[in-house]
């Protein structure tokens, strides 16, 4: 059942007293669902829209969630409008916009487009999260690299300068936000940048695997391996065989687990040791103040 206002409830014969009883759950003041409904993102958005101007559309981090990436807390929910109406609530943030809003629909609710959402998020997110957001939008085919680049070049809205700086770090073919996190931890520690998700083959051209992060010059692969326990036995066996094939062909494979994410310095040192073993003679990793701010104890998404 969709969320409904107390006025809609009265029209359906539900008294205000009943609404405050055990049979209903209040989402916002004056907005309810039956008590057995466990509200998800769409339910919360639909409930909020009952309180907002008719042109309101999900934006910022809320729109990003609609596009499939959860960064930071669910609340406050973010919406944009062309009206001058204010909505002062801790759990809702209404952004007033002067320019015409290009509204799309996802799962039946209005939201702003992916390129605009990326720029809007630049007013909230840090540089690493912004790269994660952009690479997710590209991988999920919500936009393309050229489309996003063109949008950033022609728009002049709040957040665009920060979005452009982050976009310089964006790479195509990245398949998960955690791959982004690991790659940037290496790059910002001033190690060489690996290539994301290329196909690796042996000297005879036989396919060995599609690998997360590849250092071609040093024959080192860095693999993010999340949620290993959730995979099928068949998938786990395939992953193990793929790594054994890579190692048999002379590759060093560095595996990064979820448990490693709060200790990314150790991951960087592991990669540096593997590179040095293969002839890398560049400087050791550098962990400056900004690196610590972005990566120390970084929570998993």
Image: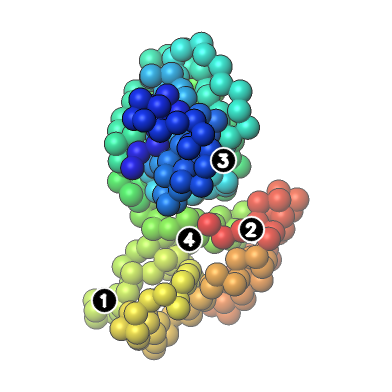
Please, what secondary structure does the residue beneath circle 2 have?
Answer: loop
User: Which mark lies nearer to you, 1 or 4?
Assistant: 4
Please tell me how crowded label 1 is: few (under 14), some (14-19), or many (20+) other residues with Cα within 10 Å.
some
Q: Does residue 32 appear in this view? A: yes
**Vertical position of residue 120 compared to residue 195: above or below:** above
Mark 3 → mark 2, Cα distance in angstroms: 20 Å
- Picture residue at 57% right of the left edge, 46% below the top: 73
- Picture residue at 68% right of the left edge, 53% below the top: 291
Give the camera-side residue of 15 and 252. Answer: 15
Q: Earlier in the sequence, mark 3 or mark 1?
A: 3
Mark 4 → mark 3, Cα distance in angstroms: 26 Å
Task: Name the residue tied to disc 1.
Answer: 207
Residue 239: which quarter of the image?
Answer: bottom left
Please, what secondary structure does the residue beneath circle 3 have?
Answer: loop
The image shows residue 211 at horizontal and vertical percentages of: 38, 69
Circles 4 and 3: CB distance less than 8 Å? no
Number of the label disc, if any, that sits on residue 75: 3
Circles 1 and 4: CB distance less than 8 Å? no
The image shows residue 114 at horizontal and vertical percentages of: 38, 36
Q: Earlier in the sequence, mark 2 or mark 1?
A: 1
User: Which mark lies nearer to you, 3 or 2?
Assistant: 3
Number of the label disc, if any, that sits on residue 179: 4
Residue 111: which quarter of the image?
Answer: top left
Task: Name the residue tied to disc 2.
Answer: 298
**Vertical position of residue 112 compared to residue 210: above or below:** above
Q: Earlier in the sequence, mark 4 or mark 3?
A: 3
User: Which mark lies nearer to you, 2 or 1?
Assistant: 2
Please tell me how crowded label 2 is: few (under 14), some (14-19), or many (20+) other residues with Cα within 10 Å.
some
The image shows residue 219 at horizontal and vertical percentages of: 45, 75
């Amino acid at each position: 059942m969709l969320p409904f206002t107390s006025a809609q409830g009265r029209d359906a014969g539900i008294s205000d007293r009943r609404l405050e009883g055990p049979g209903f759950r209040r989402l916002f003041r004056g907005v309810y669902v039956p008590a057995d409904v466990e509200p998800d993102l769409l339910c919360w958005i639909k409930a909020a829209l009952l309180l907002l101007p008719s042109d309101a559309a999900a934006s910022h981090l809320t729109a990003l969630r609609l596009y499939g990436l959860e960064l930071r807390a669910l609340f406050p929910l973010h919406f944009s409008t062309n009206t001058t109406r204010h909505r002062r609530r801790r759990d809702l943030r209404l952004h007033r916009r002067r320019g015409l809003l290009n509204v799309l629909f996802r799962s039946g609710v209005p939201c702003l487009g992916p390129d605009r959402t990326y720029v809007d998020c630049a007013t909230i997110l840090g540089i690493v999260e912004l790269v994660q957001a952009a690479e997710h939008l590209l991988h999920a085919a919500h936009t393309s690299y050229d489309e996003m680049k063109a949008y950033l070049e022609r728009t002049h809205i709040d957040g665009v300068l920060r979005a452009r700086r982050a976009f310089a770090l964006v790479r195509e073919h990245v398949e998960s936000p955690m791959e982004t996190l690991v790659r940037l931890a290496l790059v910002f520690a001033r190690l060489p940048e690996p290539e994301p998700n290329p196909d690796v083959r042996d000297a005879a051209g036989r396919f060995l695997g599609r690998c997360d992060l590849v250092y071609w010059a040093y024959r080192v692969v860095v693999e993010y391996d999340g949620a290993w326990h959730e995979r099928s036995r068949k998938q786990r066996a395939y992953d193990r065989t793929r790594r054994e094939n890579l190692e048999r062909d002379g590759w060093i494979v560095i595996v990064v687990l979820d448990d490693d994410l709060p200790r990314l310095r150790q991951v960087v040192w592991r990669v540096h040791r593997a590179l040095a073993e293969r002839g890398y003679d560049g400087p050791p990793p550098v962990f400056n103040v900004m690196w610590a701010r972005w990566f120390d104890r970084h929570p998993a998404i």
